[in-house]
Amino acid sequence: MNTRNLVWMVLALLLVSAAQAMAADKEAGDEALGKYWFPKKNGKFEVTKEDGIYTGRVVAYDDADALDIHNPDAELAKRKFIGIEMLSNFKFDPKKKQWIGGKIYDGESGKTYKCTLWFEEDDTSVLKGRGYVGISLFGRNEAFERVKPEDENKQQDSKPETKAN
């Protein structure tokens, strides 16, 4: 094999390795995509990705007609709770294996906090989040359990039926 062919072969291997590494980072970041329960299991949100930015919107809540009543902005307090953006502006950091730079909205307090998201080890069934003000030291962790396919309709199934008089 001549030197020229060897150089092309090495370059091809480097390109393939780089493409695989980039694909692995993309896949790792996309592990967060999907639906999760609120900690009290009274609602669900769905994490999606657009242009490399991860967001999460409320897709179900025990009271489908609930409004965002705790929001300090009077206009926003009139909006339906289902559909609000709960997680915003997260980017995946493959070195830290975390979604960083985003914010989380707490519908129970109407406050928005800086936030970091991650999975423990290789367990993608529970998304962890730390909301904080200022620095991460002053914050609180929450755990969001992934909605399993068999639990997809659990929220609606567990609601008590109202009896007509």
Image (cartoon, rainbow, N blue to C red):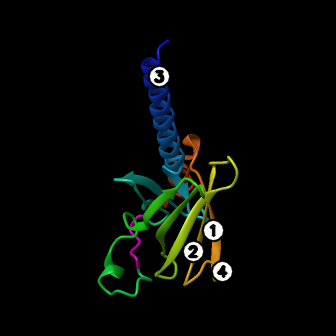
Q: CA distance from mark 2 to mark 3?
A: 48 Å
Q: Secondary structure at mark 3?
A: helix
Q: CA distance from mark 4 to mark 2?
A: 10 Å
Q: Please tell me how crowded label 4 is: few (under 14), some (14-19), or many (20+) other residues with Cα within 10 Å.
A: few
User: Which numbered disc, 1 or 3, marks the residue closer to the eye?
Assistant: 3
Q: Please tell me how crowded label 2 is: few (under 14), some (14-19), or many (20+) other residues with Cα within 10 Å.
A: many
Q: CA distance from mark 4 to mark 3?
A: 50 Å
The residue that mark 2 highlights is 131
Extreme front residue here? Answer: 3
Horizontally, residue 78 falls left or right of residue 106, namely left
Q: Magenta residues?
A: 64-68
The first of marks 2 and 3 along the sequence is 3
Q: Secondary structure at mark 4?
A: loop
- Circles 2 and 1, Cβ within 8 Å, touching? The answer is yes
Horizontally, residue 4 falls left or right of residue 149, namely left
Image quadrant where one finds the C terminus: bottom left
- Residue 56 percent location from the top left of the image: 44, 60
Q: Is residue 95 magenta?
A: no
The first of marks 4 and 2 along the sequence is 2
- Residue 71 percent location from the top left of the image: 41, 83
Looking at the picture, does residue 74 appear above or below residue 43?
below
The residue that mark 4 highlights is 137
Looking at the picture, does residue 162 appear above or below residue 14?
below
Q: Residue drawn at (41%, 53%), measured in percent from left and top?
A: 48
Q: Is residue 66 magenta?
A: yes
- Residue 35 percent location from the top left of the image: 50, 51
Which mark, residue 142? 1
